[in-house]
Image (spheres, grey):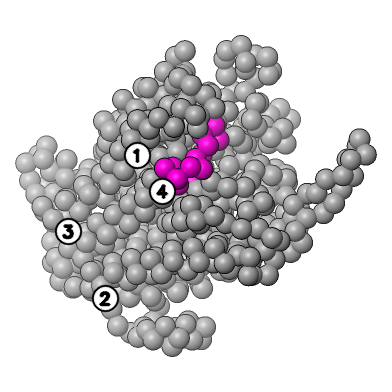
Amino acid sequence: MSPTWAGLLQVALLLLALAVVYKPLGDYMARVFTSRKHLKVEKAVYRVGRVDPGSEQHWKTYASSVLAFSFVSVVLLYLIQRLQPLLPWSFGREVNPGVAFNTAFSFVANTNWQSYAPEATMGHAVQMLGLTVQNFVSAAVGLAVAIALIRGFTRSQRDRLGNFWVDLTRGTVRILLPIAFLSAIVLIALGVVQSLKSGVDVTNLDGSSSRIALAPAASQEAIKELGTNGGGIFNANSAHPFENPNSWTNLIEIFLIMVIPVCLTRTFGVLVGNKRQGTVLLSVMGVLWTGMLAVIWSSEANASGPLALLAGGGMEGKEVRFGIGASSLFANATTSTSTGAVNAAHDSLSGLGGGGTLLNMMFGELSPGGVGTGLYSILVMAIIAMFLAGLMVGRTPEYLGKKLGKREVTCAAIAILAMPTVLLLGTGAALLMPDTAGALNNSGSHGFSEVLYAYTSASNNNGSAFGGLTATNDWFQSTLGACMAFGRFIPIIAVLCLAGSLASQRKVPETAGTLPTTSPLFATMLVGTVVLVAALTFIPALALGPIAEALA
């Protein structure tokens, strides 16, 4: 079978698997967040945390709970890293303050940017007690915020959005934990490593000896992908044979990356009482995802220039066991969500291929986006699309029976503009720093793309990188950490404010002048809005980086 047909087969199997689980998993998640029953383990958590699961919170209290939980998580994760020498399975490794600060914000913000070599820096205790725990709860935070926004649409003249602690617990216990547990077993059966040893000594062909690092990879790999986290337990991430040994594990990991964001559109449709609403959002996500896959794959399959010709095509930086097709599929999946895992070197992608991964993130990572973040991001875009439609026809815009006034549009605008603001400011400031040139492996347009990619990844809570940038100095550690925090929590606050405003409104009935939001026209408008916002914001930056590189 040719590499192209092998890649197309993986795409077909992926779409088939997602179609099979779409309805049952989407419906199950809807039941999770509407059930009035609490599991015994959940009741135990509530007792320890002194939480009344029957109480509900105003949007400000809900947002305060999100921020408080995240702040405590940052502090605890920072301390766990700094105290690593006192923990078991530390293997004599230490984490310096700059790396600990950056990593704490990175994993709490669901970014999982790694400015260190994991197998040489983090011991198993830090990986399991610190990083893996955040892989679960940071994803559950995004899921909780998405559910709160859905409640804003479904409730009428209410000032409560639910209980963050209940939503966080249910998302972790009933959704993420069981799926990750089963997935880890499957990955172990397919060859992913699971060991508490620090490594194994081997004798090389020339008679010399070396040590290959080992780790509890399978358990972290499952939630790393399922929670759209992306931080690898080895430096090579999902290109490492211990994390991703073959085409079957590659396919399963891509499936895990996309399954919850895709199925959440079904959950949305069920909860708002109109399943076609979720289908429209899924179709928009699908159009954007398929379009960018075509751009990345065709660019890598038809790489031009003397270096590509000498290498025999676009295989530089890619694993031969995956090839161009599966590598392009993984790159598209990981940058269209907020995952950041990689099975190939994105720094080695062609100009347009690398530009495709950048544009995926610049869309706002809503095609299909991260766990929870993808759904609330595309709903914010839907509100902006309806606002623009209202301006064109001269009437107050509505969406799902809720009027979109000044407050709602302001919250949506803040949620959209937060990411580009910190991204472009961070990139511009970094390029003005005299030390940045020394941190780049490349000059010219590709060097610019390396800096742009780093701040795009951080601001969108993605975590992948163009590896040519050495982002280990204090400037990059602190500014990228700040971009992760602002890119994560400013939109969350704006979305919860939007949810509170929507919930307080009375539902208005549809009239002859109401634009149907289940029609192909609305889907087209939504696609156009996403592309238009990204184009107006980022085309100048893309022209200086990947576009200039492709034209050269």
Image point (13%, 49%), residue name: 397
Q: Which residue is mark 4?
A: 478
Q: Earlier in the sequence, mark 3 or mark 4?
A: 3
Which stretch appears magenta?
A: 461-478
**What's the residue type where badge 3 is placed?**
Lys
In the displayed structure, does residue 212 sit left or right of residue 355? right
The residue positioned farthest toward the left in the image shown: 394
**Of the residues tagged 2 and 4, which is closer to the observer?**
4
**CA gap, disc 4 and disc 1:** 11 Å
The numbered dot on residue 426 is: 1
Depth check: give the residue in front, 265 or 70.
Answer: 70
Disc 4 and disc 1 in contact, CB within 8 angstroms? no
Few, some or many residues within 10 Å of mark 2 (<14, 14–19, 20+): some
Image point (45%, 38%), residue name: 454
Q: Earlier in the sequence, mark 1 or mark 3?
A: 3
**CA gap, disc 1 and disc 3:** 36 Å
Q: Position of residue 15 (x, y in %)?
A: 55, 45
